[in-house]
Structures are given as C-alpha cells and as structure tokens.
Image (tube, rainbow, N blue to C red):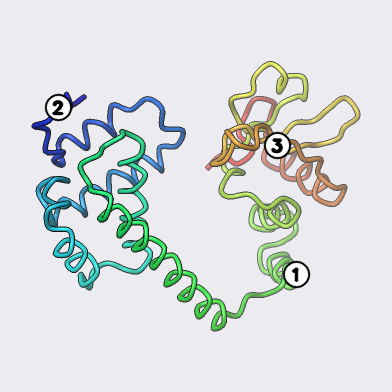
C-alpha cells in the first residue's frame, strides 16, 4: 500500500496499490472497472499530479481517442471521481474537479441519448412470444425454456447460474449463497444472497408460481439433481 506524503505523484503503480490492497470493495467487478479506468488514464498521463497540471490536454486526448466509446469515457471519468473520493486524494484542484464532474454529467447525457436511439431501432419480442418460441424450438423440458420462465417471473442478472438445490431449513443456517429451496409444504423458492446490490437490498426470497414450480420439478427429476447439488450443472 503506497505511503502518501507531499512528494507522492500518484502514479499507476501507486494507484493500483491502493485498489488491489483495498479489502473494502463490495464487488470484484467494481474493482476491475476501477483498474481498467486507471490503465486508460495512465496511457495518457504519468501521474495524477500531471493530469491536474495538464488537465485540458488530458481531456482532449481522452475524448478524441477513436477507440473509446461514450460509455467507456463515462466509466473512466466516473471511476476517477470515485477513486479520488475513496482514498481522499486531493491533488486535483477545485476548478479541475468541477470540470471532471461536468465532464461526467456530459457523458451521462450522451450515453442516455445513444441508448435512446438504440432502443428506437431494436425490435424486442414480448415475453409471451419469446416463451412460445422457446418452448416450440427447445421443448418444454429444456433448460432454455426453464431459464426463460424463471426470468419471466423474477428479473435478476445472471444469479440463476449458481443456484444450489436445498431444503428450506438449510437457508436459515447459511445465508452466503443462492438457492432453489423447497419447504415442507412442497413450495419452491428462489433465495438470493449473492448479487450485485445485496448490500442494499439484503436477502431476496421469491416463491415460484405453480407453472414454474412444475417446470423446476421436471428439470430436477430428468437431470437427477439431488439436494446440495447445483440446479444447473454448467
């Protein structure tokens, strides 16, 4: 972990030292995003002190790099602001800090505009049509149809991938994993403990409706899934 004093330049090595040794990151994906941002920034400048000194040149190079999308630039500036605040780094003067915030807001608007245009030009099927086609193409007992049905009733990210099949009483004893749990009344639940915003929303428990419960039971039987095994083996 870098020792900070008046002579600290805040180079790439020093910044990576802060990030990689930080035990308080709640998400590895956030840590990776910050590391990627630092690598992009230090392709332009040698240190944060140099960035402050040559702020206009830094922004000009960042914005005119044809290899960077709007979202990449937004993420880079966002990560820089987050890191400066996280480690209380005060080498960027107030004028340049205000400019960085304005730059970030500018790219939020640009990103939103881009997404609006994309959405206007993308044809997305309704859930009912998608499920009909998935059933017709893959079959009602297929993994594809089951996963589509799960997402239809419970909108999460990729948190179905690591479900363990357990009895409901096991969930009370271990709240560190994601589960497909069945209780003594043969009701099935999705219980999520590990997901991106878990620190804010804590445990999510969702009772599966009858139609999806039947699909789950068929899947478990057809694939020989036993208690304490993964619902989806790969």
The reply to whether dot 2 and dot 1 touch (C-beta < 8 Å) is no
**Mark 3 — residue?**
204
Q: CA distance from mark 2 to mark 3?
A: 45 Å
In this picture, residue 85 sits left or right of residue 2: right
In this picture, residue 79 sits left or right of residue 109: left
**Mark 1 — residue?**
132
Image position, residue 222 (x, y; %) = 72, 43
Q: Nearer the viewer, residue 69 or 165?
A: 69
Tag in front: 2 or 1: 2
Tag in front: 3 or 1: 3
In this picture, residue 41 sits left or right of residue 160: left
How packed is label 1: few (under 14 Cα within 10 Å), some, or many (20 or more)?
few
**Mark 2 — residue?**
5
Q: Nearer the viewer, residue 192 or 66?
A: 66
Secondary structure state at the residue bearing disc 2? loop
Q: Nearer the viewer, residue 226 or 184?
A: 184
Q: Upstream in the sequence, badge 2 or badge 1?
A: 2
Secondary structure state at the residue bearing disc 3? strand
Which residue corresponds to the image point at 57% horizontal and 40% vertical from the top-left? 197
Quadrant that contains the N terminus? top left
Image position, residue 59 (x, y; %) = 21, 64
């Amino acid at each position: 972990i870098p020792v900070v004093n008046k002579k600290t330049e805040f180079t790439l090595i020093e910044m990576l030292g802060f990030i990689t040794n930080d035990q308080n990151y709640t998400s590895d994906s956030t840590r990776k995003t910050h590391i990627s941002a630092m690598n992009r920034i230090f392709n332009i400048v040698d240190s944060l002190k140099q960035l402050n000194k040559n702020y206009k040149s830094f922004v000009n190079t960042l914005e005119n790099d044809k290899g960077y999308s709007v979202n990449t630039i937004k993420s880079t500036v966002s990560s820089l602001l987050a890191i400066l605040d996280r480690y209380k780094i005060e080498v960027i003067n107030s004028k340049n800090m205000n400019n960085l915030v304005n730059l970030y807001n500018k790219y939020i608007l640009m990103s939103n505009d881009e997404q609006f245009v994309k959405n206007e030009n993308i044809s997305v099927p309704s859930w009912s049509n998608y499920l009909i086609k998935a059933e017709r193409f893959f079959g009602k007992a297929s993994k594809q149809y089951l996963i589509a049905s799960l997402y239809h009733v419970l909108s999460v990210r990729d948190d179905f991938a690591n479900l363990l099949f357990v009895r409901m009483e096991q969930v009370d004893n271990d709240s560190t994993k994601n589960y497909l749990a069945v209780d003594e009344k043969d009701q099935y639940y999705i219980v999520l403990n590990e997901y991106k915003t878990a620190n804010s929303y804590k445990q999510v428990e969702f009772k599966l409706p009858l139609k999806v419960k039947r699909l789950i039971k068929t899947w478990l039987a057809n694939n020989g899934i036993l208690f304490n095994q993964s619902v989806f083996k790969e």
